[in-house]
Amino acid sequence: MAVQLNIAVLSLLVLFISIPKAQSTVVDVVANMHAKADGHTDISTPLLNAWKEACASPTRAKIVIPKGTYALSRISLNGPCKSPIELQVMGTILAPANPSAFKEPNWVVFNGVDRLTVSGGGVFDGQGASSWGKNTCAKEKYCAALPINLRFNFVKNAMIQDITTKDSKQFHVNVLGCQNITFQRFTVSAPENSLNTDGIHIGRSNGVKILNSNIKTGDDCVSLGDGSKNVTVQGVTCGPGHGISVGSLGKWKAEEPVSGIFVRDCTISGTMNGVRIKTWPASQPNSATDMHFEGITMNNVANPILIDQEYCPWNQCNLKVPSSVRLSKISFKNIRGTSSTQQAVKIICSRSMPCEGVELANIDLTYKGPEGPALSLCSNVKPKLSGKLNPSACSAKPTGSA
């Protein structure tokens, strides 16, 4: 009986081994689709054809853009696809330098794709230097938006790794309506004077991770808009830029709540802000809760710790009416380094709904300037305090506070 059983098991193993494994589909845009790596010839058609072939494959598929320099006018890579799909970018892809070449505010769009990977060590170069002075969106309610380098719309279960976005004309990356998407070893590269070029902006997405990445830009390194849930930012180097921000919140009607934000083990250098939460006064009702900033190193950072519920750039608001965004369950722990402004800690909450559940623990921020040592300012908040606190928590009041 045992011999018969062993023969049966052996037969099954032989059958399993003999079954041919499904072969993955590989499409090379140069070898298979005749794209030209000359930096001038538009590869939008070869790339789109490669995408369509790979997306229709019943087995795992990969599109390869080999090393070289390519010109790309604009492209939308749409799902759903039949199987997992990877875009392996090994070369440098150039956007049109002239912003008038874009009728819509996007350059490369991934839309409705499940099980997406973007990899390869390549570069998406937005060639945005000539556009940065033309963006008036920060000052005007209505404006002609410039194109975003990479858009991920309603993408699920994605890994974006070993990719660089360079010199975008507007935001480098916009994540909208996504679930379970990770950016790993991701690089954002733009100078400090690149206006309105947020590194990675997240909105109405759940389960976003930004890990072990390097972001240098002219605006927020990471910005979290309304509807951001369960977001982890860990091991990120930020600067130059405007820091890592939640918000701004409350400007528009029907904004969604923010919850589950974890910023850990990051280094922020030479930025206009460190870690901050910002909401508009006279705002639409909303809430943001369960937000935690821990293990942050600050190097010559202005406003290293900031909650600003009177966020009012360009005086586009009514400061007499308090913010209606409710903030709660917020912690700042193990944050050390140097501040470039005397106000190292500034927690300005709404008069109509003070912040709840704010915790400060083990804060050590120093300032060396003619005004004196670093200050900690608080308004409409009673934080829980623990560990070493330098500057002493809430030791100063904001100018004009009651």
Image (tube, rainbow, N blue to C red):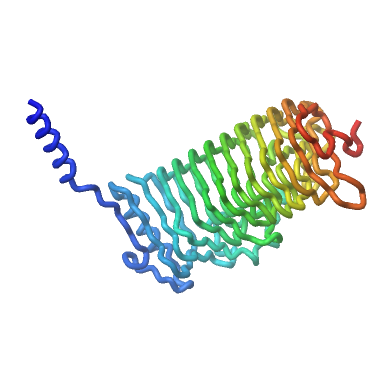
Horizontal relation, residue 74 to residue 137: left or right: left
**x, y (%) of residue 225?**
63, 40
Name the residue rendered at 35%, 62% in the picture.
Answer: 28
Q: Nearer the viewer, residue 79 or 229?
A: 229
**x, y (%) of residue 44?**
43, 62
Horizontal relation, residue 289 to residue 83: left or right: right
Horizontal relation, residue 259 to residue 301: left or right: left
Q: Where does the C terminus fall, quadrant-wise?
A: top right
Horizontal relation, residue 47 to residue 379: left or right: left
Q: Among all residues in the image, which is located at the extreme front?
A: 2
Q: Nearer the viewer, residue 46 or 144?
A: 46
Q: Nearer the viewer, residue 214 or 140?
A: 214
Q: Is residue 318 visible?
A: no
Q: Is residue 116 visible?
A: yes
* Position of 70 relative to 398 (above/below): below
**x, y (%) of residue 315?**
81, 46
**x, y (%) of residue 352?**
79, 26
* Position of 6 relative to 187 (above/below): above
Q: Nearer the viewer, residue 148 or 301?
A: 301
Q: Where does the N terminus fall, quadrant-wise?
A: top left
User: How many dots with numbers?
Assistant: 0
Name the residue rendered at 46%, 65% in the picture.
Answer: 91
Name the residue rendered at 26%, 51% in the picture.
Answer: 23
Name the residue rendered at 76%, 40% in the picture.
Answer: 306
